[in-house]
Amino acid sequence: MTIRVVLADDQPLIRAGLRVLIADTPDLEIVGEAGTGAEAVELVEEVNPDVVVMDIRMPGMDGIEAARRITSAHVIMLTTFDDDEYVYGSLKAGASGFLVKDMALEEILAAIRVVAKGDGLIAPSVTKRLIEEFAARPEPAGPRRPAPVDGITGREREVLTLVGRGMSNQEIADELSISVATAKAHVARLLAKLGARDRVQLVITAYELGLVAPPTGGSTT
């Protein structure tokens, strides 16, 4: 299956480079380009792509607001700026990936394929900071008690916890002694019930609800 891609960046040179790269990739196809966030939102409605590769800093409507408005496609933020504010804003807006422009081109292509399947992908340097940020949050007084989650079953709560730990559908199935198809169905229902676009947002939800504790310890420099 060919993955339909929209490029959104206010720098024509960046779009041209990505266009040439994707043109040489048989399973990817550029179906439109935009120079602003507003143009990207309109274009997605017109051409119905699978993935939008979008810059954050664009004139007028920025990439974060555009990602918030795009609900019919997966969004990858591809930016020079990996500032924490941009990272959290992008993920809260529903972006499925956050990559920096100095990554290898093959890694960007791989990310498009991963996100098109409904998974999330974040640049390793950004992932490390996200984990450190969660780990640095002060623990509440007394025992850590996960917050209640309205509208999901006990089994779905278990699955959400395992997704928060970074497990794949196969690993979840093995852990709970269920089929992979059943694990996938649980994840799909969680996405719908929690209004999440992909697994990245499910992971964030699991952390925020206290279902998963951030890692502690490790080496210091």
Image (tube, helix red, strand yellow):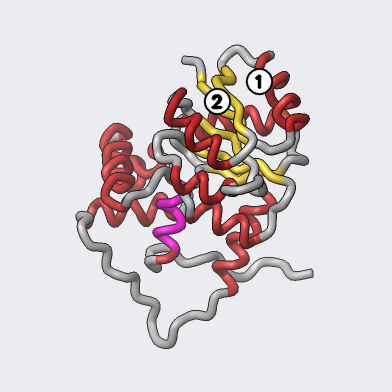
Estimate the x, y position of residue 148 in percent, counting from the top left. Answer: 27, 68
Q: Is residue 122 visible?
A: no
Q: How far apart are labels 1 and 2 at the CA level?
A: 9 Å
Q: Is residue 101 left or right of residue 197?
A: right
What span is in magenta? Answer: 200-207
Estimate the x, y position of residue 141 in percent, counting from the top left. Answer: 43, 87
Quick one: SS at disc 1? helix
Q: Is residue 143 left or right of residue 33?
A: left
> Type of residue at label 1?
Ile
Residue in front for this viewpoint, 78 or 42:
42
Number of the label disc, if any, that sits on residue 22: 1
Q: Residues within 10 Å of mark 1 (few under 14, many from 20)?
A: some
**Vertically, is 179 above or below 98?**
above
Q: Residues within 10 Å of mark 2 (few under 14, many from 20)?
A: many
- The residue under the point 40% across, 35% down is 72
Estimate the x, y position of residue 132 in percent, counting from the top left. Answer: 62, 65
Estimate the x, y position of residue 15 in percent, counting from the top left. Answer: 70, 29
> Type of residue at label 2?
Val
**Vertically, is 74 above or below 191?**
above
Task: Give whichever of discs 1 and 2 has the lower sequence position.
Answer: 2
